Amino acid sequence: DIQMTQSPSSLSASVGDRVTITCRASQSISRNLDWYQHKPGKAPKLLIYAASTLQSGVPSRFSGSGSATDFTLTISSLQPEDFATYYCQQSYNTPYTFGQGTKLEIK
Amino acid sequence: EVHLVESGGGLVQPGGSLRLSCAASGFTFSNYAMSWVRQAPGKGLEWVALISVSDAAGSYYADSVKGRFTISRDNSRNTLYLQVNSLRAEDTAIYYCAKATVGVPGTFDIWGRGTMVTVSS
């Protein structure tokens, strides 16, 4: 199985900050990497797919990059509604696997 | 508008069974692969099972549920199912259904809000 490792596991930041979350795969997954935002009690939301393609309706302050084993999610200027948990996930093959999550909290 | 609504969760004893359902609306259900993903209390997301568009293309499972869970779909009812048998305490989780994107069965663009399964005596 492909292991996905996210860092950091938690992060405190302020509104307006630039934030970067990293995700590493245990083997090459080409660009088959997606990012999700999850808030308590809500459905997870797809933000980025294929490593860098912004899902329709997602604000442009979110961006993704990377290929093979190393990927990043960047939020250019944090907004109050961005405080949530973020997950990377490989869609390369089954079993699909998620990173352990990064909880983004208000400083 | 595209919607997925899960139901069928509840409290069940270890060794018991449940059938989870996911009602889909707002899209042509039969055209998309579908998955179940779960989240145990205080834990992250875990993919559980995938069913392809057609039966011929098959279904796939996480090792943790293989042989105990069965994913199925009824395209005439726009409904996805997960039969969960031989339940264990570690199966306690919120179970989400998720719609795959076109062409990439492992990318999930629409999710439901989940149904809670609690396994306890």
Image (cartoon, coloured by chain):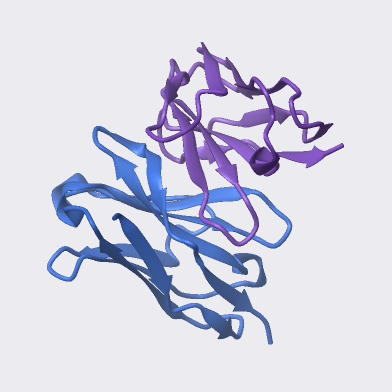
Residue B89 x/y as whole percent:
66, 72
* Residue found at x 29% / y 55%: B1
Residue B113 x/y as whole percent:
49, 62
Q: Quadrant of residue A56?
A: top left
Along the horizontal axis of the image, is A36 left or right of B121?
Answer: left
Pick whichever, B96 or A15, lies toward us.
Answer: A15
Q: Residue furthest right?
A: A107
Residue A32 x/y as whole percent:
43, 24
* Residue found at x 14% / y 49%: B56
Along the horizontal axis of the image, is A76 left or right of B4?
Answer: right
In the depicted structure, whether residue A16 falls above or below residue B108: above
Q: Quadrant of residue B80?
A: bottom left
Q: Is residue A100 visible?
A: no
Residue B66 x/y as whole percent:
44, 57
* Residue found at x 49% / y 34%: A47
Pick whichever, B103 or A84, lies toward us.
Answer: A84
Q: Quadrant of residue A11?
A: top right
Q: Is residue A93 visible?
A: yes
In the depicted structure, whether residue B37 falls above or below residue B103: below
* Residue found at x 70% / y 41%: A83
In the depicted structure, whether residue B7 falls above or below residue A74: below
| Rendered colour, chain B | blue
| Rendered colour, chain A | purple
Along the horizontal axis of the image, is B44 left or right of B20?
Answer: right
Give the position of the C terminus of chain A as an image quadrant.
top right
For the image, the number of numbered tags is 0
Along the horizontal axis of the image, is B80 left or right of B75?
Answer: right
